[in-house]
Image (tube, rainbow, N blue to C red):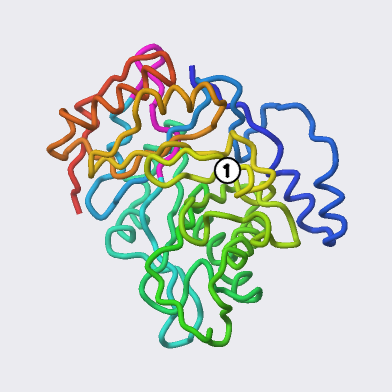
Amino acid sequence: MKQLIFKSRASRFALCAGLSMLSLFSCKQETIEPEVLNESSSVAAVDAATDIQIISCMEVNNTNPLNNLSLTLSSTGEPLIDMVILFSSNINVDPQTGEVIITHNENVTHILENRQKYLQPLKDKGIKVILSILGNHDKSGVANLDAQTAQAFAQKVKNTCDDYGLDGVFYDDEYSAYQNPPPAGFVQPSNQAAARLCYETKLAMPDKLVMVYVYSRTAHFGGSNAIPQAEAGEYIDYALHDYLQSYDLTNNYPGLPRSGWGMSSGEYALNRYPTATALTNLRNGGYGAHMIFSFDPTRSNFASNQRPALENLANILFDDQLLVDQTQIYAKDW
C-alpha cells in the first residue's frame, strides 16, 4: 500500500520564515522530530518502496488530465499517480504595466476555469495538482528576477494556487529570452536568482509544494549557487531529474533528503522509459519520486510502449499489478 508518511519540514520552514536570517540558521540546526503523520506538510518521507511518489507531468495542450484516474494498483485500488503537474503556465512581462505576471494559454485556462470537472476528481482521489511555470519568449524567467520582483512574483504564485485550489508549483527554466544587460527589476540570469525565487515562493506558501526541474538554472542550488537565507532543502520539496537521469543530487540541493529526489524520469511521447535496473535502483536507493512526462492513454503507442512501462512501475516499485480502467480514459474535449 502506498502510505504517505509526512515530515514536518514545511511547517518548520513556516516557523522560521518570520524570523531574522540569524534565527533562520539557528532554526535549521534544531533537532528534527521523528517522522509523524501530518496532513498539512509537504513531502512524503520514504522508508519503503511503497512510498515512492509517481508524478505525472501532463502535457495539457494535448491531453485531458483526468486520464490519470485510469491507472490504479490491483491490490489496493489506489491510484498509481500521486501528483499531476499541469504543463504549463508561463512567466511573462505584462506589456502594458511592465509587471512580471503568470499567464496561461487557452488549454491551461480552460482546465483551471473548469477545475471542478478536470481537477476536483483527481483531488478527490488524493492526487495533488501542481502548476508548472516556465519561460515564454520574453525578458522574464524563473532565473533572472531581482529580490523585489521575485517576492512580488512569489505572491502571485501563491494567489494562483489559492484561487484554483492547487497544491504547489513546478519551476522550469526554459524558453525565456533573457536580456543582457538586464533591465530594471531583473538581474543577470543565474542559478542563484532561480534559488531565490524558489525561496521566496516557499516563504509565501510554506504549506504548499515547491518543485524544480533538474535542468538549466534550476539544476543546482549548492556551493557558489547557494543563497544565504537557507539551504536548498529548506525551500525545495522535490527536484525532478531530466529524462532518464539518476545522478546524485546531494551537492545540487544541500539538505534535500532522498525522499525529495525524482529519479530516472520517463518521456512517454518519445518512448523514453527507465530500464528495470533503473527502477530497481530507485527502489533500493530510498529515493522518493519518479516523474513520467506526457503520459496519454489515447496516443497510438499506449498499448505497445506506455502501458508496459507503467506496468513496470507497478511491479518493480510497488510489488503490484497495474489496472487500466477503460471507463476513465478521456479525450481532450475542449
Image quarter hosting the C terminus = bottom left
Examine the residues drawn in magenta and state their main secondary structure.
loop
Q: Does the magenta stretch include residue 82?
A: yes
Q: Does the magenta stretch include residue 280?
A: no
Q: Name the residue under label 1.
A: 249
Q: Which residue is drawn at 50% across and 53% down?
A: 169
Picture quadrant of residue 271: top left
Q: Is residue 322 above or below residue 29?
A: above
Horizontal arrangement in the rendering, residue 188 relative to residue 230 (left or right): left
Residue 77, percent from left and from top:
38, 18
Query: Which of 267/326 is in front?
Result: 267
Neighbourhood count class around disc 1 (C-alpha, 10 Å): few under 14, some 14–19, many 20 upward: many
Residue 96, percent from left and from top:
42, 88
Residue 84, percent from left and from top:
40, 42
Horizontal arrangement in the rendering, residue 151 relative to residue 290 (left or right): right
Residue at the far left in the pictured view: 300
Residue 200, percent from left and from top:
65, 62
Picture quadrant of residue 274: top left
Residue type of the residue flagged with mark 1: Leu
Q: In this view, does 60 lie above or below 120?
A: below
Q: Residue at x 28, y 20 (%)?
A: 323
Magenta region: which residues? 72-84
Q: Residue at x 33, y 15 (%)?
A: 321
Query: Which of 286/117 is in front?
Result: 286
Query: Which of 6/179 is in front?
Result: 179
Element marked by disc 1: loop
Q: How many labels does the image show?
A: 1
Q: Which residue is drawn at 32% across and 32% down?
A: 69
Picture quadrant of residue 144: bottom right
Horizontal arrangement in the rendering, residue 182 relative to residue 114 (left or right): right
